[in-house]
Amino acid sequence: MTSERSQGDGTPRQTMVALGPRISAAFGAEDVRIDALCLTAESLSAALGEQRTLIHTRRSMPATITVRVLLPNRDIDLAFPRMISDPEEPDPVHRRWLAQRNAHGIVLSDHLRGLGAVHGIDVDIQFKALPFTPPVKLYLLNGTEALFAYYQVTEREEQIGRESVAMYDALGGVSPLFSFGAGDSQARRDHAFVVQSQAWFDALWTTIATDLVLS
């Protein structure tokens, strides 16, 4: 891994810290393509939000932006986040996750389409739903870089409404993000990882993933 994508000693950084600079670098291309698999798109939405200033100040001006996002289906029993005990009524943790998934997806979509309308950028953003809980998050940038992180599942309690809820949750924003790029010194290994990750994403997108409406 190059120092540009990691700390000086090569240690991966937390997703919320590392993703933004890599998205910014990807936006240096004329045709930007981002594929993402995640739980809520929170980190991706925040990272793409950082491009607003770069584009408004003309420091970044792609001709096209294509984004595809895979998220869990709203109706599946999630492995996480979920209540530790089986609820007798609808799971408040699931309801909160669904609201977050939809909110972050809508913000992401509105943000990109707004940039496209103002600056004449051709924007195509699509969402599809998966029938399982992804244990990892994956971001593929312009077909040349793969960013990969494990969801760190933990037990914790949180106040939801008037109730303190014990849950299994995943703190995706603090998960270390590993970067693989075809131009790195370990080019053969990294290139293979990028290619196989893209093939895996494409296979999910074209087979078991279904159309997703954020509502």
Image: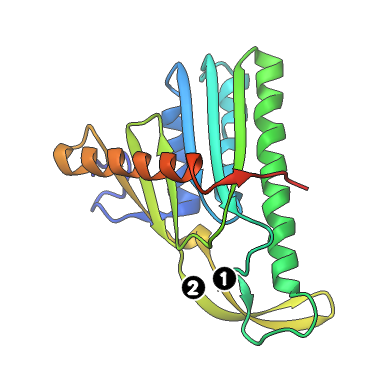
Q: Position of residue 44 (x, y in %)?
A: 55, 44
Q: Which amino acid is tagged 2?
A: Val
Q: Is residue 185 visible?
A: no
Discs 1, 2 touching: Cβ within 8 Å: yes
Q: Nearer the viewer, residue 6 or 122?
A: 122
**Crowd around label 2: few <14 · some 14–19 · many ≥20 (10 Å):** some
Side of 81 relative to 161 (left or right): left
Choose mark 1 or mark 2, whichever is in front.
Answer: 1
16 over 174 or under it: above or below:
above
Query: Distance between the Cα atoms at labels 1 and 2?
Result: 7 Å
- Judging depth in this view, the residue of 51 and 89 nearest the camera is 89
- Whole-percent x and y of residue 87? 73, 84
Scheme of colours in the image: rainbow
Counting the numbered discs, the total is 2
Name the residue carrying label 1. Answer: 80
- Looking at the rendered structure, the kind of residue marked 1 is Phe
| Disc 1 secondary structure class | loop
Residue 22 in the image: above or below residue 151: above
**Which numbered disc, 1 or 2, marks the residue that appears first in the sequence?**
1
Residue drawn at x 66%, y 20% is: 116
